[in-house]
Image (tube, coloured by chain):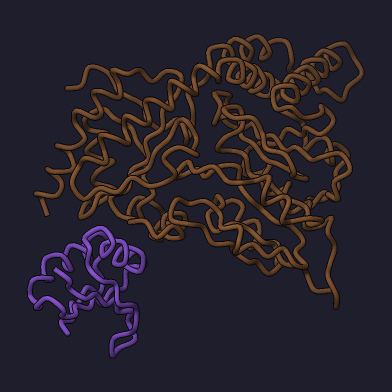
Amino acid sequence: MPDARVYLDSASGAPLHPLARDAFLAALDAAYADPHRLHHSGRSARLVLDNARAATAEALGVRADEVVFTSSGTEAVQRGLLGLVRGAGRGAGRDPRPIVHTAVEHSSVLHAASWSGAPTRAVAVDPSGRVRLDDLDPTDAAVVACQSANQEVGTLQPVEEVADLAGDVPLFVDACASAGRLPLPDGWAALAASAHKWGGPAGVGVLVVRRGARWRDPMPEDERAGRHETGFENVPAVLAAAAALQATVAEREAENARQHALVSWVRRVVAGIPQVEVVGDPEARLPHLVTFSCLYVDGEALVGELDRLGFEVASGSACTSSSLEPSHVLAAMGALTHGNVRVSVGRETTEDDIGRFLDVLPGVVERLRARL
Amino acid sequence: MLELDCRGLVCPAPVIELARHLADVPVGGLVAVVATDAAARVDVPAWCRMTAQEWVGEDVADDGTPRFVVRRLS
């Protein structure tokens, strides 16, 4: 039996940063009141919330009055994208104007775009998952959506070049995969991030709407929701998210180099397993994740067998998803979709963890193939 | 052309069938995977790239099921 479980799925949800835990516990007792109320306890909660907003803004390099806390990264994506669509208005003949997005956006972006009722145009990617600038046509678009980095394969997107090509068309950036770990790119009108990806608690998203951006709240009117808030915030969780973000940004130079090296090691060893394809850009990528696909192997069996041996990984294979559709990211790249595994490391991942994972992986792949 | 009936099979079974039966045709011959599984549309061309066989393209079988055609090169 394994002596300890190894969590290699921080890209789905990172373990809570210890500083976030401290901040959360302190705020649970101190910041329960409604930050809108004028009494002492309300003002205390307001102070905690304002501090969290200021710290978040500073860590992200944006203005405090541009930061809106949401209840998830998904909500930040929905409000950010749909608010820009609403702000752009309709085209000639009152028809909704198209949303142009990369083919490898997170499903929350694709679903929000489809739900808006506007026509959509997908921009192709190259085999590494990088958006093809020669396929980007922003003509008459309401919004261009381009992620900062891909959540499945780690490839960084040329956001600032996309912004240049978009010209006057506002750019929406889903930065959930990279925020905190990497500085934000420039050139966007609205951007979404998610705290549990940087070691904050789940249930806190961050929407940043640039001052002066043509953004109109896509949700029903509400006395406490609008450009600067989305309802009664979970103040302790928001504070914990801000603490984790500050810590992640402070540690990232050293941590990114360490994690980049761990991932390069995984890429090297995995590339040596017969008939396995490592996907995504080898260098212009997120520091902490790698995806590979093993020919003739069932992704669900691979995740299950690794879990039995104590290694927790994610998979983009159809048989592991609820939709039974293969990953649209891998499909857009032309990469093998079955036998797929995503490994992501975090500040808690050690060299020993990766060494043990790489010791067992080739044997697991071989055994699963032999069963067929 | 050899046609492999992979209707109802889910990934990675259609690609495994393809690999098993490639040698049933001579070099230069065609094998077609008839599959209802959506992953086959991506995985058959990817398999061709990874194993240095030729991806010919997609058409449909007599009953309208998607058919993915490969030429054996080695």
Left-right relation of A246 to B19: right
Question: Looking at this view, is A130 or A211 the one in front?
Answer: A130
Question: Residue at horizontal 77%, vertical 61%?
Answer: A142
Question: Looking at this view, is B55 or A229 the one in front?
Answer: B55
**Above/below status of A109 relative to A271:** below
Q: Chain B is shown in which shade?
A: purple
**Above/below status of A247 relative to A121:** above
Question: How far from the left and from the top, in percent, is residue A254?
Answer: 51, 16
The quadrant the C terminus of chain A occupies is bottom left
Question: How far from the left and from the top, in percent, is residue A102?
Answer: 59, 57
Left-right relation of A105 to A297: right
Question: Residue at horizontal 31%, vertical 61%?
Answer: B46
Q: Chain A is shown in which shade?
A: brown
The quadrant the N terminus of chain A occupies is top left
Question: Residue at horizontal 17%, vertical 38%?
Answer: A364
Question: How far from the left and from the top, in percent, is residue A228?
Answer: 83, 35
Question: How far from the left and from the top, in percent, is residue A369?
Answer: 14, 49
Question: Residue at horizontal 61%, vertical 20%?
Answer: A249
Numbered circles on residues, count: 0
Q: Quadrant of residue A247?
A: top right
Q: Quadrant of residue B38?
A: bottom left
Q: Quadrant of residue B7?
A: bottom left
